[in-house]
Amino acid sequence: MATKTQDYSAMLKDMMGAFPVDTKIMQDVYKSQSTLAEKMSAVQFDAAQKSTELSAKWMQDTLNKMSSITKAKAEPADYAKSMTDFASATAESAAEHMAAYAEIAKKVQTETLELMMNAGKTMSDEMSAAAKKATEEMTSAAKKATASAK
């Protein structure tokens, strides 16, 4: 008894041919994602560069202030005053630099939010256009299939 095996790959090919796929939509999505990634990277690199510059400046300021501590003093009380001055200056510097870090973080947050909102709008517009086009193509394919079935 010979059994005939159905050719599923031919059936799948026929089915996929009945529903055309527009690869331009996928290319547009890929392009949008790449553009978003590029913009996000630019925001991150800018923040990293500013943070690095701020860290280096903070370290340089600290080292400059430390030089006054290491100098020989004539009176023992001068060492205590030097340490107090250094601690006070370091605390003030820390507050200034932490505020600068907060500004960098705030800018990153704002720019990221703007990018994500713009990307969401763009994706929504693209998805609406793709859905509309797919609906039109499906309707057209269904009408052709109905017409050829009669």
Image (cartoon, helix red, strand yellow):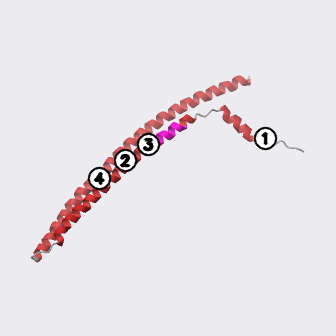
Q: Amino acid at mark 3?
A: Leu
> Who comes first in sequence, dot 2 or dot 4?
2
Instruction: Tell me the SS state at disc 3.
Output: helix
Which residue appears at 51% of the width and 36% of the height?
28
Disc 3: CA contacts within 10 A as few (<14), some (14-19) or many (>=20)? some
Which residue is identified by label 3?
36
Q: Amino acid at mark 2?
A: Val
Q: Quadrant of residue 133?
A: top right
Q: Amino acid at mark 4?
A: Ala
> Who comes first in sequence, dot 3 or dot 4?
3
Instruction: Tell me the SS state at disc 2.
Output: helix
Question: Which residues are drawn in magenta?
Answer: 26-34
Which residue is identified by label 1?
6
> Cα distance, mark 3 to mark 4?
24 Å
> Cα distance, mark 2 to mark 1?
56 Å
Disc 1: CA contacts within 10 A as few (<14), some (14-19) or many (>=20)? few
- The answer to whether 116 appears left or right of 145 in the picture is left
User: Mark 4 and mark 1 in contact (Cβ < 8 Å)?
Assistant: no
Task: Give the percent coordinates (x, y) of residue 135.
Answer: 58, 29
User: Mark 4 and mark 2 in contact (Cβ < 8 Å)?
Assistant: no
Residue at the right extreme, as displayed: 1
Which residue is identified by label 4?
102
Disc 2: CA contacts within 10 A as few (<14), some (14-19) or many (>=20)? some
Which residue appears at 35% of the width and 44% of the height?
111
Which residue is identified by label 2?
43
Q: Nearer the viewer, mark 2 or mark 4?
A: 2
> Cα distance, mark 1 to mark 4?
67 Å
Prevalent SS, magenta region: helix
Q: Nearer the viewer, mark 2 or mark 1?
A: 2
